[in-house]
Amino acid sequence: MDYIKPTQLVNDVAHTGAYKSNLKISDILIKGVLSGAFLGLATTLAFTAAIETNLSIVGAFVFPVGFVLILLLGLELVTGNFAMLPLARLRGLTSNIQVIYNFFWAFLGNLVGSLLYGFLFYIVATKLGHINEGAMIDKMIAVAEGKTLAYKSLGGDGLIIVITKAILCNWMVTLGAFMAFVSSSTIGKIAAMWLPVFLFFAHGFEHAVVNMFVIPTAILMGANLTFSDWWMWNQIPVTIGNFIGGFIFTALALHLVNKNKFAKTENVIVQYPTALKDKEN
């Protein structure tokens, strides 16, 4: 059987987090750019499915394809790293500085990739600005305004709501990242990680990297939003909430329930075994 038990799984994730904390800046940036673009592609796929079927749940079902690409290719998604690297730190496999180093460059790479795909999608969806209405354009604008102006209209309560939705989102996203280690087979990994990511998207929770694509692209398409609306009422609070959700509900929780055994775990299955082996030698 290819099922990997939780104790081994958590230890594997911790070692992968340690590996990620030592990547070169150029590697983190390139992998981050690809991750941002892939999540943008997955988002437009989900919106297309929802528009064509008139069922949002269908869009949520297909969205995890982008997440699967990121995990199977070993790319850098800052929201997933919000649990993987703190877990490595909790187990003494990396340092605070290395964790922050990865967070910063992965966030920047994800932002660049999201903006890049957003601009390219804007060209396609608006025919280089020659059209300004249509089902997809209307969907993008409505979603972006719901992710910013809706919270802004509620003031402080809006911030509490958006942070809470971000916490719930990354609880599921980081769980999906961990579930990629529950099996040694490709099909098993895909099935396992698909489930929690589907849950987050179906509930309409807030994901920092998805929003890096949706909101600025909607602004290009004519949404009545400002740069400060994007960052103050979504990007900053969502990033904070995503970190809280990933760290507390996934990394810390799973570390605590497995902490008595992690030091004795052997034969670690790391996502990047060759590179880690070279590093240890």
Image (cartoon, rainbow, N blue to C red):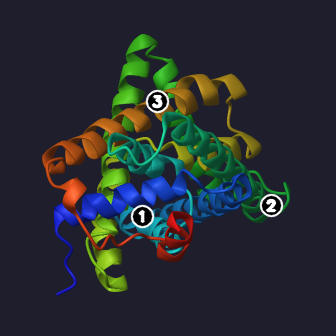
Q: Residue at x 44, y 52 (%)?
A: 80
With respect to residue 213, does 35 lie above or below?
A: below
Position of residue 63 measured from the top left corner of the image (x, y, whole percent): 44, 65
From this viewpoint, is residue 226 visible?
no
- Secondary structure type for disc 3: helix
Residue at numbered disc 3: 240
Disc on the earlier residue, 1 or 2: 1
Disc on the earlier residue, 3 or 2: 2
In this image, 251 relative to 156: left or right?
Answer: left
- Label disc, if present, on residue 59 of the rendered structure: 1
Disc on the earlier residue, 1 or 3: 1
Position of residue 176 measured from the top left corner of the image (x, y, whole percent): 33, 60
From this viewpoint, is residue 263 visible?
yes
The reply to whether callout 1 and callout 2 are in contact (CB within 8 Å) is no
- Label disc, if present, on residue 39 of the rendered structure: none
Tag 2: amino acid: Ile
In this image, 36 relative to 181: left or right?
Answer: right
Mark 1 → mark 2, Cα distance in angstroms: 22 Å
- Label disc, if present, on residue 123 of the rendered structure: 2
Position of residue 22 measured from the top left corner of the image (x, y, whole percent): 58, 53
Q: Residue at x 29, y 74 (%)?
A: 267
Q: Residue at x 33, y 40 (%)?
A: 90
Residue density around tag 3, few if under 14, some if 14–19, many if 20 or more, within 10 Å: some
Residue density around tag 2, few if under 14, some if 14–19, many if 20 or more, within 10 Å: some
- Secondary structure type for disc 1: helix
- Secondary structure type for disc 2: helix
Mark 3 → mark 2, Cα distance in angstroms: 31 Å
Tag 1: amino acid: Gly
Residue density around tag 1, few if under 14, some if 14–19, many if 20 or more, within 10 Å: many
Tag 3: amino acid: Ile
Pick out the residue farthest to the top: 156
